Image (cartoon, rainbow, N blue to C red):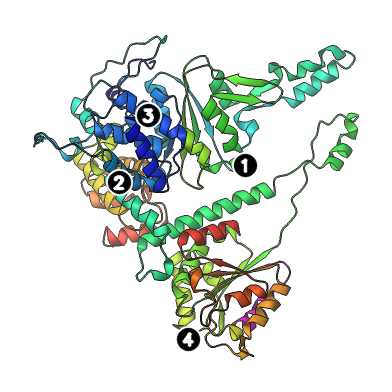
Amino acid sequence: MQVEDINIKDIDKLLLDEEYVSNNEISTTLYLSFLLGKPMLIEGPPGVGKTELAKVIAKSFDRDFFRIQCYEGITFEQIVGEWNYQKQLLHLEAAKNDTSNVDEIFDDDFFIRRSLLNAFLNQKDSVLLIDEIDKADEEVESFLLQALGEQEITINDLGTFQLQNDLIVILTSNSQRSLLDETKDRCLFLYIPYPTVEREIEIVKSKLPDVEDETVSHVVKLVHRIRDLNLMKKPSVRGTVDWVKSVSNLGTRDIDQSLQDSVGVAIKTETDKKRVLKDIFNK
Amino acid sequence: MINRIVRLSADLRKEGLPVSVRSTQSAMEIYHNLGDADRNLLKTALMAIYVKDRYDIPKFLKIFEEVFKAPEPEKNMVEDPNRGKAYRGAGPKSNKYVIKKQNTIGKKVQKEKINNEKLKMLSGQPLLEEAKKLERDGELMNKDLTKLNRFDPRMLEICQRLGKRIANKRSRRKVQAHSHRIDMRRTMRANLKYGGVPIELIKAKPRPHKNEHLFLNDISGSCEWISSWFFMLMFSAQTAFKRSRTFEFDNKVIETTKALKEEYLIDSFVKVKDMRIKNMMVHGTSDMYSAFKQFQEMASINNKSYVIILSDCRDWAGPKVKGIPASVELVGEMVRDAKKVVILNPEDRNKWDIVDSCVSLYEEAGAQVFEVNTLNQLAHFVEQM
């Protein structure tokens, strides 16, 4: 749907329709993002639903979805686009004796568009997810400042492109490095922590409606106890959902045994596993 | 209205939050749209604008409460006892906050039936518990490690996280350093077969850097704590320091490199403790002359070595020549042989050069001395190394 006359409760409702259990901070920040036209910077531990939120926003508001997955060494060309070097060369070879159309090699046809430019020039309203921005280099982040703040992109030889639609930009970060102050200043900040027991139960129920309430509640409470241990890697919400799924498949008659058998679904390192077996299951 | 927002911005700046004019402007816009009838909504909204780091959330909440003091409650709200904990919340209570956009065509809202109770629950999930944790993390990272009197497991967790972050940053820098540039000479030669048209690009191969880091940690009584934290940080960041060796000293030296190679931190730590006990290095006094002499023999320092010494530079038991500790000369020798000698001093700068501290003497000998007494300072140094 288009963003017209929308309020925070509508946002809650629309997100819940797509099985995303929101909360006050999430819905308000999204509302502000619509209101101010600012990007959202979402931080939080892995597996709490940062990326999922972006996908769900696209679905809920019936928008096109574009994604840039950042990683070490990602370049400007991989985000915005690049010149089709081979095509340019072939064109030059073909037009060897005709110097009049040499300038054509810098036309739009010779440029391969990537996600950022596609999202900017898309005619339909869109959502752009820049995932794990902290993994990208600072140069890439600096380049994105223009897109985030002024809603335009400048490409050498091609010119400046203005934003063509009502674009919602969502950046996620796992705090592997601290982002530039300039980036943070242009964004609305949202920190998604691990959910409370009640909210996590709702999340799991929305993902697995067929599982018994008792099983869900048992596993979620256990996960919360595990998160309080000093583990290397705390179990994520994704982990909780998977664990509940595994337990319900293994059988809930002897739930503790099923939990022990499938502990690897939520606990990801050997030391953590030993610790959980010892402290939680008394093994 | 403007006075309150400006005061909030100013107070947040005083607390060290980076508040720009842009943020104040956005906050004004929000305040104009939302008003202050629903304080919790305003708080959440302004938090999204002003807070740029999760560790700043507790500071923001505190200052917001000061600037936007809650009015006296007129009457007590009665909670429905049938509703669970999850359904209580402090979210928006009215529907009046509406975005008005011109010239956009609305489509039908999806009209599936929604559980109303769920929605009420969703509108309010306090962040307070998490805020308390964040406040503690933020404090711990800037706490003077030398003044810690107990082992805080949360600190260990933060330490490991910092270590991983350092390893990540260093590996990224390595990728950058090794990013291949175009080798013009080879590119031209390779493209001769295409009649000089540069179709194939040949990239230069990275030059190998064989620098070696030698860490020498003081584990005499005064520095034992920070050495332990440094060790943990190094353990977490070890993937980034493949060519490195670690040593510990009080009046003798032991090499602990092998202990770092253990799979788990706790095993590694136990192993180091064991080595210390076997060598009778528990609460010892530092004799830097003997220690440095032994270190030079064990480490075979060369022009590719970076020597990083973690010490308070208090040579308690070392010999002196004309009132000057003999270890100063050895530091000079290390500076001569190594690429760089860095000393990390966990003491406050105002205690340097007092009584038996020989910071200036080591500096004169060519070593660089830095003050490092919080986990953040320590991590910052290792990152920059």
Instruction: Identify residue for label 3.
Output: B28
- Residue type highlighted by circle 4: Met
Q: Residue furthest front?
A: B3
Q: Position of residue B342 (x, y in %)?
A: 62, 68
Distance CA(mark 1)–CA(mark 4): 48 Å
Q: Are marks 1 and 4 in contact (CB under 8 Å)?
A: no
Distance CA(mark 2)–CA(mark 4): 50 Å
Q: Are marks 4 and 3 in contact (CB under 8 Å)?
A: no
Q: Chain of mark 2?
A: B
- Which segment is the magenta one? B292-305
Q: Chain of mark 1?
A: A
| Secondary structure of the residue carrying numbered label 4 | loop
As displayed, is residue B314 above or below residue A113?
below
Label 3 environment density (alpha carbons within 10 Å; few <14, some 14–19, many ≥20):
some
**Is there one chain holding both mark 2 and mark 3?**
yes
**Is there one chain holding both mark 2 and mark 1?**
no
- Residue type highlighted by circle 3: Met
Image depth: mark 2 or mark 1 in front: 2
- Residue type highlighted by circle 2: Lys
Instruction: Identify residue for label 1.
Output: A73
